[in-house]
Image: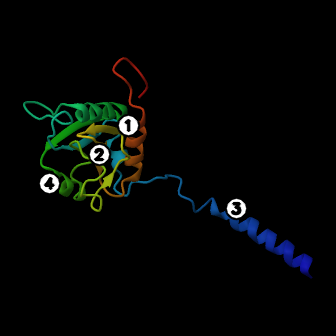
Amino acid sequence: MTEIRRVLLLVAAALLVAGCGSVVPTDFPADPDGTLDRVRDGGVLRVGASPRPGWVEVGDGPPAGREAELVAGFADHLAAEVEWTVAGEEELVRLLEDGKIDLAVGGFTDTNAWVDKVGLTRAYAEVEVAGTTEAHVMMVPMGENAFQVELERWLDDPPTAGGGTS
């Protein structure tokens, strides 16, 4: 009797494991609001920019600076156009929360106060400032994980000016 019970338990376990494949999401990570799918292949990457010397410079024309160049490269990678919104940090957080922009840049660090309202990328650059190390991040809408993962992968190895992959 115990041998039959053991065989039945093994069969039940095998069926349970085999059935798990049908409930595991195939699109992981996912974007509840579809940011990556909307932006990719001819879409518009809506980017908020908060001025910070060296990182995001604003004036006539689109923003410039280190992060503006990264945004342009990421948009090229996605085959998307960039639409810029220049505003202060607090306004950019509100726009991210409301789904009005997809990404915010402005020389933000991993110690910023908005971590409970928006998603932060992994640090992609570390800079020494007055004897302290600043770890720089970009802000994305909370929960748009596929978009954030795509951005982080790209930031891990952006193409250089002389070539590289995209």
Q: Name the amino acid type tagged 2.
A: Met
Between the C-alphas of marks 4 and 1, the distance is: 24 Å
111 on left or right of 27: left
Question: Where does label 2 land, which residue?
Answer: 138
Against 46, residue 113 (above or below) is below
Quadrant for residue 73, please give it. Answer: top left
- The secondary structure type at the circle numbered 1 is helix
Between the C-alphas of marks 4 and 2, the distance is: 15 Å
Instruction: Name, please, the residue furthest toward the front.
Output: 131
- Where residue 122 appears, as percent x and y from the top left, is 38, 46
Between the C-alphas of marks 1 and 3, the distance is: 37 Å
Disc nearer the start of the sequence (1/2): 2
Instruction: Name, please, the residue furthest toward the left.
Output: 60
- Where residue 4 appears, as percent x and y from the top left, is 89, 77
Q: Name the amino acid type tagged 3.
A: Ala
Residue 155: assigned label: 1
Disc nearer the start of the sequence (1/3): 3
Question: Where does label 3 land, which residue?
Answer: 18
Residue 91: assigned label: 4
Between the C-alphas of marks 2 and 3, the distance is: 40 Å
